[in-house]
Image: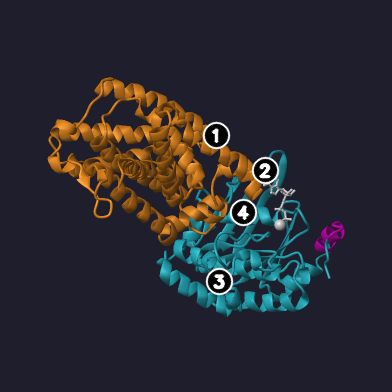
Amino acid sequence: MSLLRCEGVTKYFGGLRALDGVDLVVDPGEIVGLVGPNGSGKTTLMNAISGTFGINAGRVEFDGTDVTGMRPHQRAHLGIARTFQIPKPLPSLSVIDNVALAYTFGRDQVPMGRARQLAGDLLAELELAGKALAPVAHLNLHERKLLGIARALGLEPRLLLLDEVLAGLNPTEVDLGLAMITAVRDRGVAVIYIEHNVKAVTSISDRLYVLNRGTNLVDGNPRDVVADERVVAAYLGDAHADPA
Amino acid sequence: MSPMQVAVLQTIVSGALLGTLFGTIALGVTVKWGLLGIADFFHVSLTLFGAYVTYSLVSVAGLHPLATLLVTVPSFFLLGMALQWIFVRLEVKLFTSLLVTFGLFVVAESVITLLWSADTLTLRPVLPEWLTAPVALPWPLQQVRVLPPDLLALVAAIVLIGTTTWALRATRLGRGLHAMHQDPGIAEVFGVRLTRTAVLVAGFAAGTAAVAGMVVALKMPLSPHLPLHWLGVVVVSSLLGGLGRPLGALIAAVFLMIVQNLWALFYSPSWAPVIAFSFLLLYLVLQPLLTGRGLRSLGGAA
Ligand SMILES: Nc1ncnc2c1ncn2[C@@H]1O[C@H](COP(=O)(O)OP(=O)(O)O)[C@@H](O)[C@H]1O
Ligand SMILES: [Mg+2]
């Protein structure tokens, strides 16, 4: 059975149709790449899955449960975790306490002392241990993105939604990031990986979806998808895109 | 000690102890204002309501004053939760909360008058001697006398403000509340139940009003317009102490009441109530200069 099933997901912002009947399926333990030109609705789809806002039509099913009407905390408790395109750590908490928050309020509701230990272990794995006690204001972009991932993993999710976590990083950092996402998948966590950099996402995705203007354009095997002429055309129409 | 020195010491001690009572009342106000974004003037009325309920439970039902807490705290907890639940449903924001709770504040005076009459009521005649007889402080302050309800106010303040300060730092509820205050959207994505958190915190705040109400009933004669006299000190202490910081509110309340009592000792008592607001004005003028944050900080502490 698939882990996540989105059917006909539709979302309007006023008169703007950000998503128009999008379908998407994720199986347990796979990396699904989600690409598309700027403004094609990728982040909006992520918000619809994590429950940040309600949708106008369609349905979202997680592990056989209809979650369409559920609040974000309920979805978090079922095992849906996400990062934010612009990292949003809580400024008054240290790095480790930001991660511990997720353990404390996540799926297993870990007691606070234990949550801090687990958070420390996770930060060590991500090579952020040196900054564990620092205020989040002391982190650079790369570290803030890592913290965003650590915090999402702190929920001990079954599905991890990553929104352009590698954008703005240098090539070495991107390679490390890709290895890390693969490692997360190998632990059995399914990943939806939104990325503007098509090459990066193609290299690690098991399957690839392309959105264009809020609708499904193409999906399937990453190599076939990037070679599809509709995809090439969509990206050529987008001045900001970097299909290489 | 000279009689004047004793009078000054006595004034300072009484002022400080009265300050602990206002600090306890301010506890609920500062936590709700600073961390839930609800400026709750009604909390002050709720305190007096607690005092009247204590009065009836002791004088009519014959309960031991401390035993009344077993009745008042849980019922106020439920009342506070119910009110906050309605606020959450109606998506009440800071400014609306100010208007709504001020309305409730006005209505509460009428309701209390209706239920208990406008006459002054006092528990003093029915209280046991250990709650009414003045006690001398230990050496070297043996010439200073305090009343047992004032000591009760001190104990209540230490216990409640201590517990709250600890809970805000070290419990799940406190951590969730801070997260929700900073970014509700993020908090919710990481599993914090927003409604539950807000409702529990408001219930706790109302519970503290019940405790403060009991101290009020033991300490002073009750009349329906008391909240009007308290509101200034409570709100100013909450602001001066830094919204969302109960310990700050306590320190501010103690300080304000000492200054106010000393003023009344040396100058005209009728001007004493102006003290609190003078400090607030001073603070409002100086604070933007000192911190560069401006009046935005009235929206709540970080
Ligand atoms: N909260 C919002 N309010 C109004 N419009 C929005 C909002 N979020 C996204 N949009 C619009 O929806 C469209 C899709 O945006 P988004 O999902 O962020 O695209 P992507 O992540 O693929 O770049 C864009 O036109 C964007 O301007
Ligand atoms: Mg986006």
Between the C-alphas of marks 1 and 4, the distance is 29 Å
Q: Chain of mark 1?
A: B
Secondary structure mostly taken by the magenta-highlighted segment of the chain: helix
Instruction: Using residue A170 as the reference point, say whether residue B276 is left or right of it.
Output: left
Give the labeled residue for mark 1.
B95
Identify the colour of chain A in the image: cyan
Image: B56 above or below A91 = above
Give the labeled residue for mark 4.
A47
Label 1 element class: helix
Give the labeled residue for mark 2.
A12
Between the C-alphas of marks 4 and 2, the distance is 13 Å
Give the labeled residue for mark 3.
A133
Q: Amino acid at mark 3?
A: Leu
Q: Is residue A157 shown to the viewer in this render?
A: no
Q: Is residue B225 shown to the viewer in this render?
A: yes
Instruction: Using residue A206 as the reference point, say whether residue B199 is left or right of it.
Output: left
Q: Judge if badges 4 and 2 mark residues of a common chain.
A: yes
Nearer the observer, B26 or B265: B265
Q: Judge if badges 3 and 2 mark residues of a common chain.
A: yes
